[in-house]
Image (cartoon, rainbow, N blue to C red):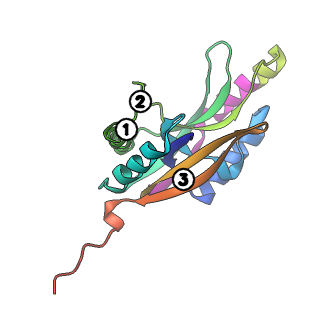
Amino acid sequence: MRIFIGLDMPASVREALVLQQFLLPLHRRIAAEELHLTLLFCEDLADDLAEVLHFELSDLHLPGFEMSLAGLGLFGGTKPHSAWAGVAPSVSLVALQAAVEAAGRRAGLDLPHRRFVPHVTLGRFSRTDPATLMRLERGIAAGAGFAAGPWQVDEIVLWQSVLTANGPRYSELARYPFAQHRRPPRDP
């Protein structure tokens, strides 16, 4: 099973991202309902580890925080393969990602050590002709001042990713609200 843990976004942020997608010459746009920020991706996860991961994520006690998107960019260097919207610097987001990764390791996942680069993928593309690449780079430069949010992050989501001929499709498996939204039991 291919799963990932990430952040969902409010409709207003999704709308701002869809507008940016429209302004860029992207071959394969991410569907509006599938725009998200990945905190941790797990490929080929066995069912028993998925269950342990679920319990580890359920035990996280995290504070909520505000988050905003800022800027656009490309992954792939001189041969770009995807366009993204960046995230405004956030110590809280970095701490959240570290907590989610630690939960994955406690669950027994064999996770590669990667630098966390928070972003929302807008679209992917394969070989791009020079004219399209120039339009893409101009669009990214024009979107350098892009901003969306802020919004309150108060939960993480566990999704399953299924590869199809038209790209990956995501289905939600579980939501994990942060501690501030869990009411402690009242004393009698």
User: Does any portion of residue 175 appear in the rendered image?
Assistant: yes
Location of mark 3 (residue): 8
For the N terminus, the image quarter is: top right
Q: Quadrant of residue 129?
A: top right
Q: Residue furthest bottom?
A: 188
Asked if the magenta segment contains residue 117, the reply would be no
Asked if the magenta segment contains residue 141, the reply would be yes
- SS label for mark 2: loop
Amino acid type of disc 1?
Glu
Q: CA distance from mark 3 to mark 1?
A: 18 Å
Sequence-wise, the earlier of marks 3 and 2 is: 3
Q: Nearer the viewer, mark 2 or mark 1?
A: 2
Q: CA distance from mark 2 to mark 1?
A: 8 Å
Residue located at (62% from left, 59% from top): 11
Residue located at (43% from left, 31% from top): 116
Report if the CB atoms under discs 2 and 1 are less than 8 Å apart: yes
Q: CA distance from mark 3 to mark 2?
A: 22 Å
Sequence-wise, the earlier of marks 2 and 1 is: 1
Location of mark 2 (residue): 111
Badge 3 crowding class, 10 Å Cα cut-off, few under 14, some 14 to 19, many 20 or more, is many
Region rendered in magenta = 136-153
Q: Residue furthest left?
A: 188
Residue 140 drawn above or below residue 91: above
- SS label for mark 3: loop
**Does residue 72 appear left or right of residue 133 in this picture?**
left
Where does the image place residue 159, in percent across and percent down from the top left?
A: 55, 49
- Residue 101 circle label: 1
- SS label for mark 1: helix
Amino acid type of disc 2?
Leu
For the C terminus, the image quarter is: bottom left
